Image (tube, grey):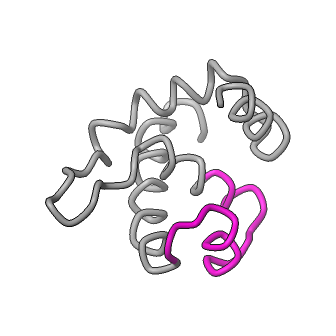
Amino acid sequence: MEEELDTTIINFMRLSRNDFNYLLEQITPKIKKMDTNMRPSLSPRDMLIVTLRYLTTGDQYKSLEYAFRISAQAISKFVPQVCDCLVEVLRNYVK
């Protein structure tokens, strides 16, 4: 699974594992949701991967829905939130 993640990160997002882990570590406290009795929440890792894929490819939410098996409605809710967190985290790196 980790090898598959490395391939996804390198091929589609142009990030090293260390950069991905840094971003994930920084935004996790801000985007983590609680599990409910009805269903488990999406992991911050999955939300970051989908968001980075959206930012790198410009795919529509519907195509991301098929690629990641996450509803387009859920994607439309968390992508802006993750983007806001990324802007906050990377504020000193990107002017």
Front position in the image: 95 or 73: 73
In the displayed structure image, the side of residue 76 where residue 6 appears, left or right: right
* Residue 47 screen position, x and y as percent: 48, 52
- Given the current orientation, which residue lies at the most extreme left position? 37
Q: Name the chief secondary structure element in magenta.
A: helix
Residue positioned 62% across, 61% down in the render: 68
> Where's the N terminus, which quadrant?
top right
Q: Residue at x 52, y 67 (%)?
A: 70
Q: What segment carries the magenta color?
A: 52-71
Report the side of 86 relative to 37 (left or right): right
Whether the magenta-drawn stretch holds residue 60 is answered as yes
Question: 95 above or below 38?
Answer: above
Q: Quadrant of residue 16?
A: top right
Seen in the picture, residue 5 relative to 17 is either above or below; the reply is below
Q: Quadrant of residue 56?
A: bottom right
Out of 37 and 31, give the one closest to the viewer. 37
Q: Residue furthest top?
A: 18
Position above or below: 15 against 88: above
> Between residues 21 and 8, which one lies in front from this camera angle?
8
**Residue 13, picture quadrant:** top right
The residue depicted at 51 percent of the width and 24 percent of the height is 22
Q: Is residue 71 left or right of residue 8?
A: left
Residue drawn at 47 percent across, 33 percent down: 24
Residue 50 picture location, percent across and down: 59, 56
Where is the C terminus found, in terms of image quarters?
Answer: top right
Whether residue 64 is in magenta: the answer is yes
Count the labels in the image.
Answer: 0
